[in-house]
Amino acid sequence: MQEKRQLGVIGSSVFAPRDHHSVSLEEAMFTVTKAALCDAGISIDDIDGIVVASCDQMDGRAISIMAASGSVGGVGRDILSTPSSGEHAFVLASLRVKSGIYQTHLVVSWSPLETDSVNEVQRLSNDPYFHRALPLDDLASHALQANVLESRIPGLHAAAVEVTRTNREHGHMAYPDQSAHPSESVWIDGGKMLRYPISEGMVSKPAFAAVAIVIASEAWIKAHQPSHVAWVHGMGWATETAFLGDRDLSQLPSLVAAGEQAFAQAECKVSDIDLAEVADATPYQQLLSLEALGFCPRAHWVQATQAGEFGKQGRLPVNLSGGALSFNPVFCSGLMRIMEAANQVRGKAGVHQQVKVKKALAHGSSGFAMQYNTVVIFGDKVQGLLA
Amino acid sequence: MNIPRVGIIGIGQSHFKARRQDKNYPELVREAVTLAMNDCKLSFDDIEAVVYSLAPDALLGIGNAERLGVDAVGARNKRFMRINTGGSTGISSVAAAHSHIASGVCDVVLAAGADKVGECGDSQTILNKIWDPIYERPLPLGTITMLAMSAVRYAYKYGMTEEDMARIVVKSRNAAVLNPYAHLRTPTTIDDVMKSRMISWPIKLFDCCPQSTGGCAMVLASEDYIRKNKLEAVWITGVGHSTESYYIGDRMGIGYAADHADAHALSEAVQRAYKMAGITDPIKQIDVAEMYSPFSNTEFHAIEAAGLAKLGESPALLKEGYFTHDGPRPVNPSGGVLCANAIAVTAMVRVAEAALQVWGRADAHQVKNAKRAVASGNGGDHQFFGAVVVES
């Protein structure tokens, strides 16, 4: 299949007030949109289309995209919405710009905390006959994956603690106001057991945030010359089946498929990637992701984490933003990973900017036991027509 | 703007009914998918991506219910995403599938979904929850009361009568008699409509769409793939969406942002699709329209938004038989949303029916010599609008 058009990220913003009760959802959407447009150096009049991702159950509204109409500048504009994940919104917006019908797009997603219990909201996603009677929420599904991995890989628990510690150190530098979780191993490994083998110290609490990204076509970028661009070189996305009993939870074939799609489009190898932002709802998910993406087979997980391979000075810096282990706006965590990887390539990552990032990979995951997986590869130069 | 052509190569839809106790939700999706796959004679190995069409989760009582449909649509380890723009979800899903192909990323994409609105209890109780919890939800707003206010305003501006509304119902039901997939297939009369129970003045029971259960699926493919594999297809030549305000209060009173009588954002969506398709005179260039109109009064402003009548003129033209199946500007020869509304896929059915018409495959409700059709979808609180132009 011939790729015909290139596109790039030209602006982004995350809005995460410490006191989320001080702003309404619509104010948050407006604020993050305005900041992303400002970062791109354009106004809403320059936006051709919008793709929004929101979750009805988290928002407490049926058709939760509706609230976005005015607050993200959607009136009179072409809006689509995907509730399957924030990262799908980025993919769909990119496809629309690639189609040539649109020159620019705004992507917005948010993760409110108005619901009494995020866990109960997640449980509603279980089928009503077989799984809903189980105490199955996202964390429990991640714990099931962790269990099967720990049973097969000696020393994995210590590696998981080390992954958490590394990400937390990154998070303390990147977002000191938001990342308030411990980075000492003793605290990470201790505390209340939430879902065995995952303790309180190994996850971060759900947080409120809104994320916005502005993308534009190659033609638009050439005409308007925005100052910082991360070119989208490759995208891949794929899904597992829903029923956990039908899956080998120690494997992620959908992420393997998504990675293959993205690397094929980007025409690059794993070794070309300078930096990665990957899904890390718990440290076990980060390790599983790194394997499925081809960065580190499970046989080397323990050794690689102890050697600091995924730290800022390591072989492959991973989650320099701190990842979801440091700050976890549940529904838009995946879109944050995409934003962070893009900003590293744009040279706009802030205090956690890594030097000379020519290619960065973002991975977002959503659903029970990482059902949906999305991979985006960014580069600092336009790729041109692909063969 | 050089946009690659995207073709429709397979269509499947349920026989819509109030309830389908013989099939659970994923099985209902699978039913439509199987029909579409058989229609295009491809295998699941040929499908590169799936766009899943599902409106509010609350209608099914399962959060992110699309996850349960992954196997039903054959998407395991494939590209998959869900679309939800309320009632317009189906046409938005087709637009998203179109983007998958027009972008050059995929050659063959399946768009599919299903809904069990007839089994959800009371959809209006759920649909009240679409409004913001502070200002408008405490009002007795549902999609019926919302569009009853639009009817009152339209009647005030353009002189529409309740009999005009009833005439739409009679036209739709007469059409649905010929469409085996429609849910309500019994003919009715103006008198019967006028005597039916008042729901929210001036909308009476027969002016309302049914709560339907069923699924729809469509297979889209790139022109290269279609030519290479010598497949039969009709073509999507125009796609457009537009949006109104969230707050109903912004559409009425002094200083309103948009007039609740009209469907200005639908008009914008249609115009975007027409522009892409090169349509400048829809009365001459559009042979048939499948317009999303869940209540009789909304068909008038949908017809006008499609450019098939001037603002406020459609009730008079209807009386003269302009929009019937065999009239000069046929609208909703399938019976439309008034005769079947499984919300998640209703707007996809509009595209499917438009495609069947220009394909010459609409059987008993075929419009003669239909070569170019427009389809539309409405979602949210009469807020999200999509339009698609299909050509043979």
Image (spheres, helix red, strand yellow):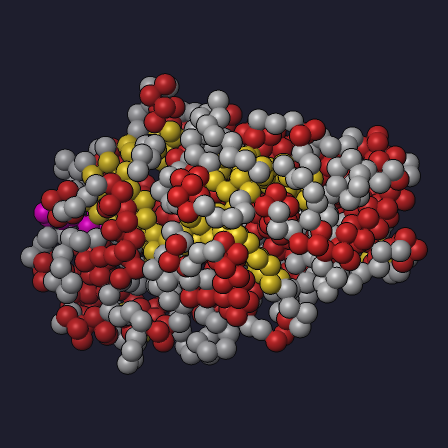
The spot of residue B270 in percent (x, y) is 26, 51
Residue B22 left/right relative to B205:
right
Q: Is residue A233 above or below residue B83?
A: above
What range is drawn magenta here? B326-333
Residue A209 on the magenta segment: no
Front residue of this view, candidates A105 and B343: A105
Furthest residue to the bottom? Answer: B254
**At x 78% / y 30%, what residue is drawn?**
A297
Residue B332 on the magenta segment: yes
**At x 70% / y 45%, what residue is drawn?**
A354
Number of numbered discs overlaid on the protein picture: 0
Q: Is residue B35 above or below residue A74?
A: above
Front residue of this view, candidates B41 and B149: B149
The spot of residue A30 in percent (x, y) is 50, 66
Q: Is residue A325 visible?
A: no
The spot of residue A177 in percent (x, y) is 73, 65
Q: Is residue A285 visible?
A: yes
The spot of residue B256 in percent (x, y) is 30, 75
**At x 48% / y 26%, what residue is drawn?**
A386
Front residue of this view, candidates B120 and B135: B135
Residue B246 left/right relative to A137:
left
Front residue of this view, candidates A254 and A244: A254
**At x 19% / y 50%, what residue is drawn?**
B331
Q: Is residue B240 above or below residue A256?
A: below
- Magenta: main secondary structure equals loop
Furthest residue to the left? Answer: B320
Residue A379 left/right relative to B123:
right
